[in-house]
Amino acid sequence: MEARGLLYIDEPMLHLSEAQVIAIADSASELGDEGFYLSYVERYVDPDPPIQDFAVGRLSFNRYRELLDRATLTHVLVSQHGRWGVFVTDEGVAVVAGPETFVASAYRTLPPMREQATRYASDILSTELPGLHAWLRDLVNGILGPEDAAAVLSSAESP
């Protein structure tokens, strides 16, 4: 993967919003790569679990919502050709990866990545969980790079 991005998830069920799904679908379409797989990262342990991996011809918000379980489970959307992926956590954030053109295209209709990263960082830093704070710093640094990460974290820490 050549580029990474971060999507802030403020939906009550912690899934991608309609605008985020549309941005990802449009970006994939621009690559000529519309098909995708959706797979739950967290797995059911029931003796007879429901289907947890899906192949889909074209990404749409309605299809995405149909495939999500009633529970909020961490899941991943991956291009059928392995060109891009979106890791959606139940922690209020998703990580996007793919060619630079894919990631840049996704942000054309979404709030800028730094703005989304700042909102997420503000949420995490408002908790009293130091371990999560350290993880956040590593995540933002890995996605944005040291200079932008420092600016995001400084903004998030300011009242």
Image: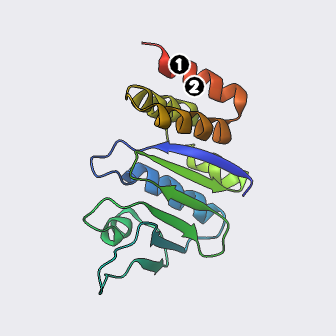
Q: Is residue 65 left or right of residue 133?
A: left
Residue type at mark 1 is Ser
Residue 127 picture quarter: top left
Tag 1 near tag 2, CB within 8 Å: yes
1 or 141, which lies in front? Answer: 141
Tell me the SS state at disc 2: helix
Q: Residues within 10 Å of mark 1 (few under 14, many from 20)?
A: some
Q: Residues within 10 Å of mark 2 (few under 14, many from 20)?
A: many
Q: Position of residue 144 (x, y in %)?
A: 66, 36
Residue 155, numbered label: 1
Q: Is residue 102 left or right of residue 157?
A: right
| Residue 155 makes an appearance in the image | yes
Q: Residue at x 67, y 66 (%)?
A: 83
Q: Residue at x 30, y 86 (%)?
A: 47
* Mark 1 to mark 2 CA distance (whole Å): 5 Å
Q: Position of residue 71 (x, y in %)?
A: 27, 63
Q: Position of residue 143 (x, y in %)?
A: 64, 41
Q: Residue at x 59, y 57 (%)?
A: 27
Q: Farthest top residue?
A: 159
Q: Residue at x 32, y 65 (%)?
A: 65
Residue position for label 2: 152
Residue type at mark 2 is Val
Tell me the SS state at disc 1: helix
Q: How many marks?
A: 2
* Quadrant (top left, top right, bottom left, bottom right) of the C terminus: top left
